[in-house]
Each structure stands twice: as structure tokens, then as C-alpha cells.
Image (tube, rainbow, N blue to C red):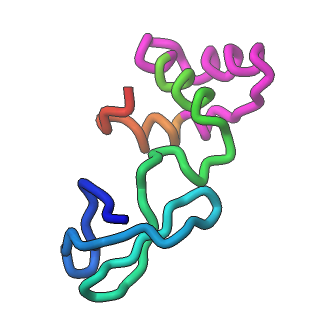
């Protein structure tokens, strides 16, 4: 099965195919150089917190709320997150077209 809009990071070939998965990530193999790699289809994979919590925090940050206010809003929804984590999310995802 060929995968569209993805290329091998090693040789830049577009001749790749899916070869199973691990930890919810798609494992992909290049037909030309036979190297395997993982798809980066989800910007939030490997994060401790759910995607919706991160998106909510980013939305609140872009709405002008302080990290303390964001922390309080997430705590009211049952999600305990530190201010440093909120700073890290803003730094990592700002300007990436996430929302």
C-alpha cells in the first residue's frame, strides 16, 4: 500500500509503504533504500496530556489568558497541568498552524 504526500527522510523517495504500527504510530518503509521510519501524522503524539487539553490551552493562550488562568481553567475540567508545561506548549506549537 503506497502512502501519499510522504517521502523517505533518508533518500527523499516517494516510493514508500506502510509496514505495521508501534505505539499508535505508523511504521513506514522506503522501497528504494529499505530504511524504516515513523509517520509524523499527529502533532500531539507522545504527549502525556490529551490533544483536546493542549488545544484548549493554546486557544486560551491566544485569547490573552495568562498561564495561571489557563491552569485554573484546565483544573476545573479535571486536568492538572503546570504553568511550565503551558509555556512549553506555547513555545512548541506557536506558529505551526495547529489551530
Image position of 28 with respect to 55: above or below: below
* 72 displayed left or right of 99: right
Q: Residue at x 24, y 85 (%)?
A: 32
| Count of marks, rendered view | 0
Q: Residue at x 27, y 60 (%)?
A: 6
Image position of 79 with respect to 85: above or below: above
- For this orientation, the residue located farthest to the right is 78
Q: Residue at x 55, y 24 (%)?
A: 57
* 50 displayed left or right of 27: right
Closer to the camera, 19 or 40? 19
Image position of 81 with respect to 9: above or below: above
Please report the bounds of the magenta region as a residue range: 60-86
Q: Residue at x 58, y 34 (%)?
A: 51
Q: What is the x, y in percent for residue 54?
A: 56, 31
Q: Is residue 31 magenta?
A: no
Q: What is the x, y in percent for residue 67?
A: 58, 23
Residue 98 image-quadrant placement: top left
Q: What is the x, y in percent for residue 50?
A: 65, 36
Amino acid at each position: 500500500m503506497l502512502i501519499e504526500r510522504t517521502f523517505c527522510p533518508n533518500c527523499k523517495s516517494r516510493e514508500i509503504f506502510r509496514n505495521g504500527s508501534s505505539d499508535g504510530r505508523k511504521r513506514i518503509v522506503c522501497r528504494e533504500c529499505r530504511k524504516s521510519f515513523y509517520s509524523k501524522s499527529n502533532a500531539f503524539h507522545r504527549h502525556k496530556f490529551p490533544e483536546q487539553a493542549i488545544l484548549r490551552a493554546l486557544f486560551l493562550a491566544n485569547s490573552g489568558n495568562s498561564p495561571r488562568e489557563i491552569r485554573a481553567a484546565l483544573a476545573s475540567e479535571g486536568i492538572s497541568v503546570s504553568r511550565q508545561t503551558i509555556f512549553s506548549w506555547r513555545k512548541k506549537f506557536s506558529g505551526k498552524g495547529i489551530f
